[in-house]
Image (spheres, rainbow, N blue to C red):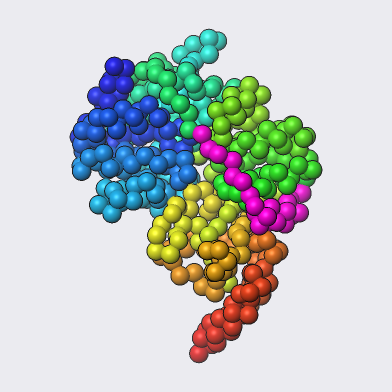
């Protein structure tokens, strides 16, 4: 079988890059699941995204390993067994690790069939994030040519002539449902939309509130995409005239197969690798760069939790630190953190006196703007007391007095 030629490259001691996010190869996943002995002694290196990638590569064999950057919930048992190594890196340093320090023996690229006019050059399709980075770094290269993968008119290519192995097989593409926002998410999105001017360069993350934000921006004009991903709502913004005639850039597409095909046909976005899409220095040169991302909790110092639910890791920092850094130095830029004021059916506040989790995802020096359904807290250049006051004001009314009392106690402890 065709995929047996790929599986023959899975040998003990090898470090193999496999595409994650919407570039994950379902056919290869199924082949490995059917022949788990192939993972004996293999270390898979990949950027797997919660909500997109759930397969447990490290769970296939007691000697398998997975190296990744965000906590993959589907690999919880393998993590407990010590077979999952999570490198606590944001996206840009993760790309540098793959390029310079991962010591890849093999890289697998998921590509579209070459267009007739391009000879042996194949588009990396809907996921440009780490493909060419790993391809250039690996000792051996495997190209998985998928007839279902659309060729993006503007995006990275690999030359199949440089591959050690080329296989062609059909595989369904990873699809990402569009988040449905309720009344709270829509209220948050409305507040954020009021902050964003015409002509802004936007990075918007994953989640129901970010999805609602795109829809709340229908009346804007000349918006520019400068993001890690482009979702289905990009088509809607184009149709209503909200997008500018400029170079829209993202690392991956995330949506339905129909969206992938239409985005390729309409050539709305240029895909690029993570070394471009998450380069804070370059993005910070953009005027009016706005980074808008969801969070699990924020404390009164402005510290943000993106990763933890109690003591359980749910994700990782992803590209949020890269984009938050860029927003702070961009002329007119804003780093926006979005979160509902309450969780667990309203029983707990997401705005807390002090984060009680294992790590802080975004430190207080990157704090800028926090938005809940109750309003906007501007933290940049604010004192400790002013930050606390602003955040308490957008907490749910039922928790404000408690938070104010906790802040007074904490402030008293600072002066002892």
- Location of residue 111 in the rendering, given as x and y in whole percent from the top left corner: 46, 23
Q: Is residue 191 magenta?
A: yes
Taking depth in this image into account, of 1 and 390 the one nearest to the observer is: 1
Residue 115's place in the image compared with 229, above or below, is above
Would residue 334 be visible to someone looking at this image?
no
Question: Residue at (39%, 22%) from the top-left corner?
Answer: 143
Q: Is residue 81 left or right of residue 385?
A: left
- Location of residue 58 in the rendering, given as x and y in whole percent from the top left corner: 29, 42
- Location of residue 241 in the rendering, given as x and y in whole percent from the top left corner: 78, 34
Q: Is residue 334 left or right of residue 294?
A: right
Taking depth in this image into account, of 331 and 186 the one nearest to the observer is: 186
Residue 403's place in the image compared with 161, above or below, is below
- Which image quadrant is residue 62 in? top left
Question: Residue at (35%, 31%) from the top-left corner?
Answer: 29
Q: Please, which residue is most extreme toward the front here?
A: 345
Question: Residue at (33%, 44%) from the top-left corner?
Answer: 67
Would residue 288 be visible to someone looking at this image?
yes
Residue 8's place in the image compared with 55, above or below, is above
**Residues shaded magenta:** 175-197
Taking depth in this image into account, of 272 and 145 the one nearest to the observer is: 145
Q: Is residue 86 magenta?
A: no
């Amino acid at each position: 079988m065709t995929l047996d030629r790929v599986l023959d490259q899975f040998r003990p001691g090898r470090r193999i890059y496999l595409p994650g996010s919407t570039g994950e190869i379902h056919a290869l996943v199924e082949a490995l699941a059917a022949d788990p002995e192939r993972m004996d002694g293999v270390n898979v290196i990949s950027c797997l995204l919660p909500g997109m990638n759930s397969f447990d590569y490290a769970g296939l064999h007691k000697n398998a390993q997975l190296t990744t950057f965000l906590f993959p919930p589907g690999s919880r048992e393998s993590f407990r067994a010590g077979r999952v190594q999570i490198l606590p890196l944001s996206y840009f340093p993760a790309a540098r690790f793959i390029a310079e320090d991962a010591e890849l023996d093999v890289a697998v690229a998921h590509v579209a069939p070459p267009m007739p006019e391009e000879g042996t050059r194949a588009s990396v399709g809907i996921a440009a994030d780490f493909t060419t980075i790993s391809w250039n770094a690996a000792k051996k290269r495997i190209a998985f040519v998928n007839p279902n993968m659309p060729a993006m008119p503007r995006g990275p290519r690999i030359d199949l002539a440089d591959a050690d192995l080329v296989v062609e097989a059909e595989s369904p593409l990873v699809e990402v449902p569009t988040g449905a926002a309720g009344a709270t998410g829509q209220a948050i999105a409305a507040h954020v939309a009021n902050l964003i001017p015409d002509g802004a360069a936007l990075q918007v993350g994953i989640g129901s509130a970010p999805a609602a934000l795109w829809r709340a921006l229908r009346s804007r004009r000349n918006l520019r995409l400068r993001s890690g991903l482009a979702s289905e709502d990009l088509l809607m913004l184009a149709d209503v005239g909200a997008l500018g005639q400029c170079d829209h850039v993202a690392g991956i597409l995330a949506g339905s197969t129909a969206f992938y095909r239409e985005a390729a046909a309409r050539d709305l976005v240029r895909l690029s690798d993570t070394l471009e899409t998450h380069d804070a220095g370059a993005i910070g040169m953009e005027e009016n760069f706005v980074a808008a991302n969801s969070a699990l909790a924020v404390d009164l110092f402005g510290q943000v939790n993106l990763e933890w639910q109690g003591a359980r890791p749910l994700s990782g920092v992803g590209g949020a630190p890269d984009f938050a850094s860029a927003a702070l130095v961009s002329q007119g830029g804003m780093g926006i953190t979005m979160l509902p004021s309450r969780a667990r059916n309203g029983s707990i506040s997401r705005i807390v006196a002090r984060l009680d989790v294992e790590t802080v995802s975004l430190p207080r020096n990157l704090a800028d703007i926090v938005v809940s359904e109750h309003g906007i807290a501007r933290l940049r250049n604010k004192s400790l007391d002013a930050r606390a006051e602003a955040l308490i004001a957008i907490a749910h009314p039922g928790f404000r007095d408690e938070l104010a009392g906790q802040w007074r106690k904490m402030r008293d402890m600072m002066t002892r």
